[in-house]
Image (cartoon, grey):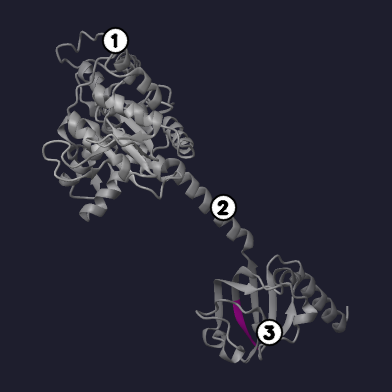
Amino acid sequence: MHLEDDVIFGSKFSRYLLDSMADGVFTLDKNGHITTWNRAMERISGYRAAEVRGQNCTLMRFSLCLHKHCPNGVAECGIYTHGSVDGKECSLRHKDGHLVPVLKSARLVKDDNDVVIGIVETVTDLTELKKARKEVEVFSRRLGEMHRLDNIIGKSRVMQKVFSAIQAAASSDATILIQGESGTGKELVASAIHYNGDRSEKPLVTVTCSALSESLLESELFGHTRGAFTGAVRERIGRFEEAAGGTVFLDEIGEISPFIQVKLLRVLQEHEIERVGESKKRRIDIRIIAATNKDLYDLVRQGVFREDLYYRLKVFPIHVPPLRERREDIPLLAEHFIKQQNQKTGKSVRRISAAAMRLLMDHPWEGNVRELQNAIEHAFVLCSGEEIDLFDLPVEIRQMNYPVGKRETLSFKDNHRGRRGRVTREKLTDLLDACDWNKAEVARRLGISRTAVWKYMKKWDVPLRPGSE
């Protein structure tokens, strides 16, 4: 092959090499005019090679190059000063006018005498990457919404049902009855329903029914006229009127008297009220959400609560589960309360030790989420480092008494008087099963510490809960 053939072959090879690349590649002469333009650049920019050859690179109007917008010409370009651009995320303007996100790199090309003869630039199309990033952001946001709705936090299956119920309730105007133990977050559920519904721009008025006597509650809800009773020196509107167009949340509804029950039933049926001391009927437009930690149906059977009011209230019932039925949410809740306390106290607590977390997971949580929140707040008082440990937790959590499990069938006579017997994996798992997996009770029966029980479980790969292997 002759020298001329080598040159032709080399030229063709270089052209094929450039055109086979997925990234855009173009070259400039020392004056900043485009000399080569591969097919990927045609695809990314919309410009054909014949259109741009001899043109200035400013036609692409890169949004960010060497910390500023594309200059008017190569003389103002910082490439001569810096010598290179490495992986700069920016955008170029497509021929049809839209912006294309790209990753740009550039290098000066010099001859053997260190004289600049041109510039080589590469452009990677980030359109798909940007799209993927947005999808991840949307997914993360949706995941966050799924695990948290207006300060209600949880990823457990039972909490997903609560979230679904909240969204269904928010899209309707039905009367809601929220049932659950004290400390489960019923008021948060009521708030989420209101602020995710059509009445969100109107007031949410909360009334704790158990905090007031019958006469005061009547006045609080319905309002009164001047002179209606001793001390009524001026007219006052009630909470139902204050909430016009919005929502009234009646907490602890199971505590209201038969008289208030009758008046509330009339509100639900007629959407009218009468202020105390007057006979004028006033139309109201409100939604009522009620909550109770009692079994209202049991109160109905006892004759303490009106059956017709009960069914008027529970048009759409929502049950908020106790924390012991959603233990997998405890780490998520604890993390949330730690963040809250860090902001409040200025501390930098990062985590809970494994031993302390095991204790939290084992605790019965009779006070539910509110008790857990208080426990974390207590721990912040004692914790001086980045980690909450066992002895930072309240004493009632560290020294709790578990109820003996219903399936109690085994007794270890050799340990009954506190003598330590030989612990085997089989003995440990049998006793865990007998004690409904309460580690504190197992420790007492074996005559060892709870920490020792955890160490045995870790040694023999025994799961924290049955069926989680």
Crowdedness near tag 3: few (<14), some (14–19) or many (≥20) residues, C-alpha within 10 Å = many
Q: Are marks 1 and 2 in contact (CB under 8 Å)?
A: no
Q: Earlier in the sequence, mark 1 or mark 3?
A: 3
Is residue 356 something one can see in this rendering? no
**Residue depicted at 15% across the width and 45% down the height:** 382
Q: Amino acid at mark 1?
A: Glu
Q: CA distance from mark 1 to mark 3?
A: 84 Å
Helix, strand or loop status at disc 3 = strand
Q: Amino acid at mark 2?
A: Glu
Disc sitting over residue 135 in the figure: 2
Where in the figure is residue 347, as x and y percent of width and height?
22, 54
Frontmost residue, 442 versus 364: 364
Q: Which residue is mark 1?
A: 408
Residue segment shown in magenta: 106-111
Q: Which residue is mark 3?
A: 28
Disc sitting over residue 381 in the figure: none
Q: CA distance from mark 1 to mark 2?
A: 52 Å
Residue 332 figure quarter: top left
Q: Amino acid at mark 3?
A: Leu
Residue 88 figure quarter: bottom right
**Residue depicted at 52% across the width and 84% down the height:** 82
Helix, strand or loop status at disc 2 = helix
